[in-house]
Image (spheres, rainbow, N blue to C red):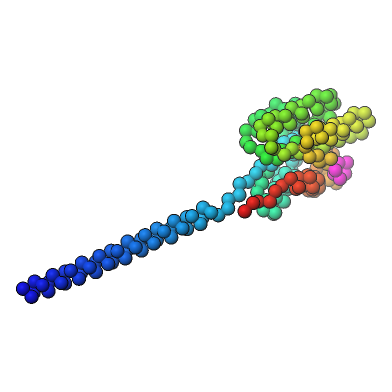
Amino acid sequence: MKTTIYHFVVLWFMGLTLFACSSKSAEDQTSSEKDDVNDSTQTNKMPVTKKQTILFFGNSLTAGYGLDPTEAFSSLIQKKIDSLKLPYTVINAGLSGETSAGGKARISWVLRQPVDIFVLELGANDGLRGIELSDTRKNLQAIIDTVKARNPDTKLVLAGMQMPPNLGKKYITEFKELYPKLAEANQAVLIPFLLDKVAGIPSLNQADGIHPTAEGNKIVAENVWAVLQPLLTQPSL
């Protein structure tokens, strides 16, 4: 009888010990799960900054004709943005030889992606080909209208251009005035002259005398940046 009681006590004690260990294990597991949940919650609370898009829409000047893609002024703008840790991605939608009519034809395709800042650089090829300024104006306005229709909140930037003097005083004057008038009519920010301090300087242009060299593009990037930077917002945390 004593032996039976002894065995019962031993078994009861072992069962109690196993239950305590099991309870402890379950408690540890629950605690671990809570820690995981807390860690997950903390991770989810970390700020996530969504990048906005800057689209450069233009011709060979935007495309970076004759240069490595990293030397195009849009790429230099991206480097400046990255150095300041601003939440923007630059897209180069430049196409060599593009006219305002060509830009009008492809703008809807380009705007399949959301755009926060739209930089329009077109018209130079129109001028060099002697296209009627009224047509150029209508095409540029149609491009701007399409951008506004897709997203009324898109910030507009218009890159002003000028023509060489051999095209006649009347034409070059009216061409130059076209851009500030368009900018004012559409509440767009104007880059007065994209090629300021570059146009007509042989050392800053390629052999054709039209397209900037890599050094010339650095100056063009500064011309653009002076107007673009005030439009950029700091990331909100």
Q: Is residue 176 visible?
A: yes
5 and 139: which is toward the camera: 5
Residue 145 location (% of width, % of height):
72, 29
Residue 163 location (% of width, % of height):
87, 34
Residue 215 location (% of width, % of height):
80, 48
Q: In this view, does 31 lie to the left or right of 128?
A: left
Q: Can residue 94 be seen in this view?
A: no
Q: In this view, does 16 lie to the left or right of 130?
A: left
Identify whether 25 is placed above or below 148: below
Identify whether 140 is placed above or below 35: above
- Quarter of the image with the N terminus is bottom left
49 and 218: which is toward the camera: 49
Q: Quadrant of residue 115?
A: top right
Q: In which quarter of the image is residue 12?
A: bottom left
Residue at coordinates 78% horizontally, 40% vertically from top-left?
189
Identify whether 174 is placed above or below 19: above
Q: In this view, does 56 lie to the left or right of 38?
A: right
Residue at coordinates 69% horizontally, 37% vertically from top-left?
153
Stretch in magenta: 196-202
Q: Is the magenta stretch mostly helix, strand or loop?
A: loop
19 and 111: which is toward the camera: 19
Residue at coordinates 29% horizontally, 64% vertically from top-left?
23
